[in-house]
Each structure stands twice: as structure tokens, then as C-alpha cells.
Image (spheres, rainbow, N blue to C red):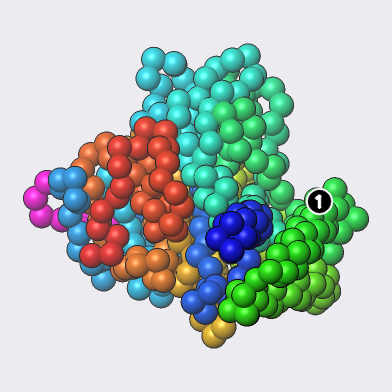
Amino acid sequence: MTRTTDSTRRHFLKASGVLMALPFMESLSWATTRQGKQPPRLLYVYMPNGVHIPAWMPKTKLSGQPDNQGHHGLLPETLPPSLKPLEEWRSSFSLLTGLTADKARANGDGPGDHARAAAAYLTGVQPKKADGAVLLGKSADQIAADYLGQSSPFRSLQLGCEPAGNAGECDSGYACAYSGNISWQNETTPTTKEIDPRKVFDRLFRNNNSAAGQDRLKTFQRRKSILDAIRNDAKTMAAGLTAEDRHKLEEYLTGIRELERRLQLEETKIETSVADDQRPTKLPKDFKNHIKLLIDMLALAFQTDMTRVATLMFGNEGSNRRYLEIGVPGGHHSATHHKGETNLIKQVCSINTLHSKAFGYLLNKFSETHVDGQPILNSTAVIYGSGIADGNRHDHHALPILLAGGQDLGIKPGQLREYKKNTPIGNLHQELLRRLQVPATQLGDATGFLPGLDS
């Protein structure tokens, strides 16, 4: 009898091992976890070309010199001009200062700050000039996607207002891929970015005929096949078991049947859960309407649990986009090199303010979009910032960084936190990965975690 029990245990553990290869299967009831809470999510929102620091950074100074723990206080009652659109959301975000992207600095490699700024922002790795080729590292969002993405149809979602333009050289010998992407699957491959909201919608909800859709259906079929194998394997073990063991086995099979039901529901919901009238009808030419549609798609993707990790680029690094809708006739990048010229400074501030309005729209959308009666903002850590601080000087220290949402992750908003000079921004990324319960990993030049986000 002992031999039979041992053999049965080995078979059962083997079957369980297959099941464990499908993490978080209990959460396939769409946007709920085993504890009945929303799943954790991560979103990076990137603004190119830095900001005009005097109009963006609060003048309030915290007393003393910050140490490794940082100093903190409440956000000032009056936000600086470029952050004015976020006044009503001041209780939903914190401003972090002192963080640095050291690998965006030249470090002996000459000009090319814009390419390095985007490339190093989520990787903490010094990009290489290699005749248009790339050599970088996996980004923080993709490290999160390796873990969180196992529980949703899409590992991650990358959106932006400008195409990446991955071919050729764009910035002082650096590959264009560096300037056009912040998300990297590995040291040589950026994660594909989509700019058309219509294509985003179809990819997520209507495009089972596409390659991505076919891959998704194959994944469902593979999961079903695995469950069939587990069920059949378990039935063969029934002979010779005690009544107590047969009862345990029946409970196990009941769980398998429930997983099958949820898989069928998941496959159906992909085509029916989002109404056709939510599909965008065009690709807007102006930034304001374009970014709103992309944010709407992000909110839908998180609400329906199609993905739990995403990036959104307001523009590529070095972007010279003209914002005619706000009276800025010249290019964005050109204006940032103002050399103190008043008119150009005003243009930069107007663009910074427009971007803040867009981020305010995101906070509003994520607050209004609910799952199980709770806003998705509560369970989503949202980082808004740039790999360049002052666009005129190409600084990479004291970066403009806002951290919003994430209350369910223990993040306390409404703070102004100052960290010791040259604290790696990778410490922020690693802290968020830790809060998302992503297995520990070393990200680029990070030196540890970032304390104080819950103080």
C-alpha cells in the first residue's frame, strides 16, 4: 500500500506541476484575484525632451540634506505653472526628485543625450553606438511582464504618439531604436509600439484573424489540452485509492472543470466584452485627441484584464513635433534649446502644460474606470516622467518624476520626496517590481530599492 501511495503521489505531483505552469489560473474570472482584489498593474508614461525646470519643479525645499532614505513632505499648496492642470489630482500622485539616469550621460561616449535618455530610462544600461545596431538590456516593464503577463492574454502593451522608426541612425550615431522605444525585450530587441488606437482596439478585442490573435487562440487551445491531460492522468490514479484519497481527487477534478469553464468564458469574452461603439474611428492628427484615444485604450485593456503591464510614450526622444493646436509653430526639440530666449521658453512651458493636461486626463480616466466597484488607479502604479531633466542643458539628474496611483500596493500619494543626489532611477523601478511581487532581479545600475513611498 505504501508503494502505491508513493507512486500515486509522484503522478499527482507531476500533474500538479503541469497545472503550476499556468500561474494565477484562479484569476481567469477576469480582473479578480484569489483574494477578490484587482490584479496589480504597472504603467510607464514617458514625456520626451525634458522640461523647463523652473516652471515644472516646485520651489519648496525640504530642510536639510537628503540621505539614502530621502526627505519628504506634502506637495505644496500651489503647484508650479506646468503642473497646474494636475491641481485637482494632487492627492493621487507624489513628486519624486533627486533620481538620476546615469547611463543616459555620455560617460565618455560623446553626444547623443536624447537617444541615451530613452534607452536607459527603464533599463539602466549604457547604450552603445554600433553603426545603427543596438546593444542594451531588458527594461523594467518587460521584467514585470515576464511575471504579471502570464495571467493575461497579452504580456504587455506598448503605445505611443509617434512611430518608433527602428531602422538606421538618429542621434549622433545612435540607432533610431534607442530614441523611439523605452520598452526592451532583451539587449537587442525593442518591444513593438503601436500608435493607431484603432489597431490597438482590434488587436485587443477583434483581431483573432491576426497573427497575434491566432497565437492567443493557440494558447487557449494548449491550456485546454493540458487540462485534459491532467484530468485523464488523475482519473487513472483513482483505482486502488482509499475513500479519503478518492474524495481529495474528486475535489481536484472539480477544480479542473472550473478552470475549463473559465477558459471558455475567457475565449468568449475576448470577442464580446467590449462593444463596437468603443472602437476609435480615426487616427487624430493633433496630440490632444490622439493621446486621449490611446489612454482610453489603456483603460479598456486594464479594465478587461487583457494586460497588466504597459508603456505610453507621448513622443520619441528628440521629437521635433509641432503643437499647432496650442499655438506652438516650431518644433518641440528646437524650442527646448532656447538658450534663455523668452519666446522659446514660453513654447516649452506650453508643451509641458499640454502634457500635464494629458496626464490629468489619464488620472481621471483611471479613476472613473472601475473593476468590482474600485477604480483601476488604486491597483496601478503609474510613473510619469522623462530621462532628461532640463531640456536646454540635457541634464540627467533630478529627473522630473511623478508617481501616481498604487494605493493597493501600499503607495502613499500626495508627497514631495527628495532623494540623495545621483540616486539611480532604477531603484524606483526595482521598488515597484518588489511591490508587484515580481521575483527579485538586478536592473541595470540600480543599487537597491527606493524607500519611503509609503511613509
Q: Identify the residue at horizontal 31%, vertical 47% (top origin).
A: 449
Q: Quadrant of residue 86?
A: bottom left
Q: Identify the residue at horizontal 69%, vertical 31% (top origin).
A: 166
Secondary structure of the residue carrying tag 1 is helix
Q: Identify the residue at horizontal 20%, vertical 63% (top origin).
A: 73
Residue 452 in the image, given as x and y percentages of width and height:
25, 58
Residue 317 in the image, given as x and y percentages of width and height:
55, 37
Q: Residue furthest right?
A: 209
Magenta portion: prevailing SS class? loop
Side of 1 relative to 102 (left or right): right
Q: Identify the residue at horizontal 42%, vertical 41% (top origin).
A: 441
Q: Quadrant of residue 258?
A: bottom right
Residue 282 in the image, given as x and y percentages of width and height:
81, 61
The residue lying toward the viewer, choosing from 81 and 159, is 159
**Quarter of the image with the C terminus in it:** bottom left
- Residue 49 visible? The answer is no
Highlighted magenta segment, given as a residue range: 58-65
Q: Amino acid at mark 1?
A: Asp
Q: Quadrant of residue 279?
A: bottom right
Q: Name the residue beneath numbered marker 1.
A: 215
- Residue 190 visible? The answer is yes
Residue 111 in the image, given as x and y percentages of width and height:
46, 20
Q: Is residue 111 magenta?
A: no
Q: Residue furthest front?
A: 1
